Image (cartoon, rainbow, N blue to C red):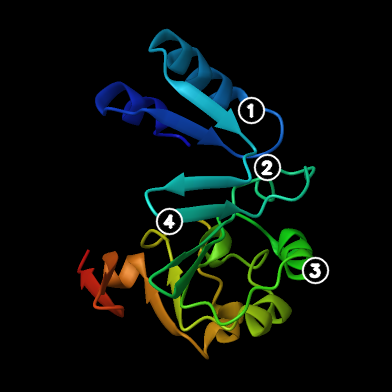
Amino acid sequence: MGEAINLVENFDVEKVIFNCGEFNELEQELIKVLNKKKILYYSCIKELNIDDNKLHFLNNKDYDNENDNSSVIYTELNNHKFLFMGDAGIEKEKDIINKYNISNIDVLKVGHHRSKTSSSKEFIDEINPKYSIISVGKNNRYEHPNKEVLNILDSSKIYRTDQDGSIMFKIKNNKLKIDTCSP
């Protein structure tokens, strides 16, 4: 979110999707820029169609903290299942398990940089990811990803941006290919 205004000012942005919940100060500042540039924005949507693909936003209630209000997105591309957890924590994970029948995820973008407030064992056991992606900076002040709970993801192949750099998934002939580019 911190770079959203910079992105809108320097790239051709057609629409912006906000998570559920009240707009914080950064979001309010972004909305001023969006209004000035006449860019449409939406909040707390359920689905988004992109060509023949559909993104499902698994936001099922308004939480009392900003991280749990972040967008959680599920999609299937060529029979491969992707789940992007945003900064969602354990409370939201429980709600997702209770509301949706999601299992055998091919690619999980791990929630909240793999802090100890995300990716409970119950959740990971339920969704059973093949690949887990952790977006985290090297030597970050929060010491993410949490070493004690990395073991929860040990049944999946883990990729980390601090170690693997950029991580790209390509689907060709219904096969999933993973490329990394060292940091």
Of all residues, the one furthest to the front in this rendering is: 52
Q: Residue furthest bottom?
A: 155
Relative to 100, 124 lies left or right: left
Q: Is residue 72 above or below residue 46?
A: below
Could you tell me how far apart the alpha carbons at marks 2 and 1 are, in whole angstroms?
9 Å
Label 4 – label 3 distance at C-alpha: 25 Å
Question: Label 4: which residue?
Answer: 53
Residue where numbered disc 2 is placed: 66
Question: Quick one: label 2, few (<14), some, or many (20+) residues within 10 Å?
Answer: some
Q: Few, some or many C-alpha atoms within 10 Å of disc 1 (few <14, some 14-19, many ≥20)?
A: few
Q: Residue 124: x and y, percent? A: 63, 79
Report which residue position mark 3 lands on.
98
Q: Nearer the viewer, mark 2 or mark 3?
A: 3
First in residue order: circle 2 vs circle 4: 4
Q: CA distance from mark 1 to mark 4?
A: 30 Å
Q: Label 2, secondary structure: give it.
A: loop
Q: In whole angstroms, how far apart are the C-alphas of marks 2 and 3?
A: 21 Å
Q: How far apart in space, not on screen, are marks 3 and 1 (Cα)? A: 28 Å
* Amino acid type, mark 3: Asn
In this rendering, which labeled residue sits more in front, label 3 or label 1?
3
N-terminal label among 2 and 3: 2
The image quadrant of residue 182 is bottom left
Residue count near mark 3 (Cα–Cα under 10 Å), binned few <14, some 14–19, many ≥20? few
Please state which amino acid type lies under the numbered disc 2.
Glu
Indicate the quadrant where residue 11 lies. top left
Mark earlier in primary sequence (1, 4): 1
